[in-house]
Amino acid sequence: MTRTEIERIKEEYPPGSYVKLIEMKGEPQMVYGLKGTVMAIDDIGQIHVNWENGSTLALTEEDIFEKMRMVRVIVCRPGEKPTIEEIGDDLASMQAVVGGMIDEYQPFYDELDPRIENVTIYCNEEGKLNNLERNRSIADNDGRILDIIRGPFFICYATVESETFHDLPEDLEEKFMKKYEWPEHFVDTPEGTFAIPYDPQKPARQEDLSR
């Protein structure tokens, strides 16, 4: 391998980038679809990777692999504040976040900002069927609850024209981090279900849960 080729590899696979394995012959523990994080490129062009199975085997010219595109998303889990995470844009990575088959949901609308319609929730398709823990409510502009998402979900940006999902624009990321900042307790009454935001670091007040 020439010095020029090695420099090209270093540019294409900087430390922190992600790869997915297709085939590594002679290593049965290195299965198809295994993901890893690039640690370094050595002087002979081998790509040293921290694999998700704990292996640190390097990739060579003989191996078949691909670079993964990572997307910055907002992840909301029941009982927790939201987090910003980077996930692969492949189906397996999306399913890993929600814990099952995914369902795409675009419930948002703002006549002053048409980008809002592209803000997309990916949640567990069987969340209600499997009675997963209630997570966050989806409400209209008047605060009326339209739906309650069960189980973990993530929020990203997905236009109708695109077959992939993308990072949220910076201002929308800030807006939706604020919108779903607090987890919610849900209180079922004869008049309907009410969502009560709470700080997960503080114990819930009994009067809030019983009202």
Image: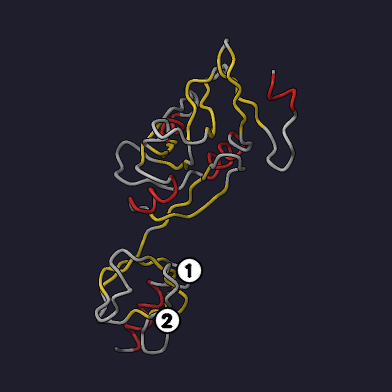
Mark 1 residue type: Gly
Q: Nearer the viewer, residue 14 or 153?
A: 153
Residue 22, compared with residue 166, is above or below; it is below
Q: Nearer the viewer, residue 50 or 108?
A: 50
Residue 129's spot in the image, x, y percent? 39, 31
Residue 194's spot in the image, x, y percent? 60, 20
Q: Secondary structure at mark 2?
A: strand
- Do residues under tags 2 and 1 come within 8 Å of each other at their CB atoms? no
Residue at (48% x, 34% y) in the render: 150
Residue at (28% x, 66% y) in the render: 32
**For the residues marked 2 and 1, what is the alpha-carbon distance in whole angstroms?**
11 Å
Residue 44, compared with residue 166, is above or below; it is below
Q: Name the residue beneath numbered marker 2.
A: 41
Residue 54's spot in the image, x, y percent? 45, 72
Q: Name the N-terminal-most of marks 2 and 1.
A: 1
Residue 71, compared with residue 137, is above or below; it is below
Q: Nearer the viewer, residue 92 or 139?
A: 92
Q: Which mark is residue 158?
A: none
Q: Secondary structure at mark 1?
A: loop
Residue 173, compared with residue 192, is above or below; it is below
Q: Nearer the viewer, residue 14 or 184?
A: 184
Mark 2 residue type: Ile
Q: Name the residue beneath numbered marker 1.
A: 16
| Quadrant location of the N terminus in the rendered image | bottom left
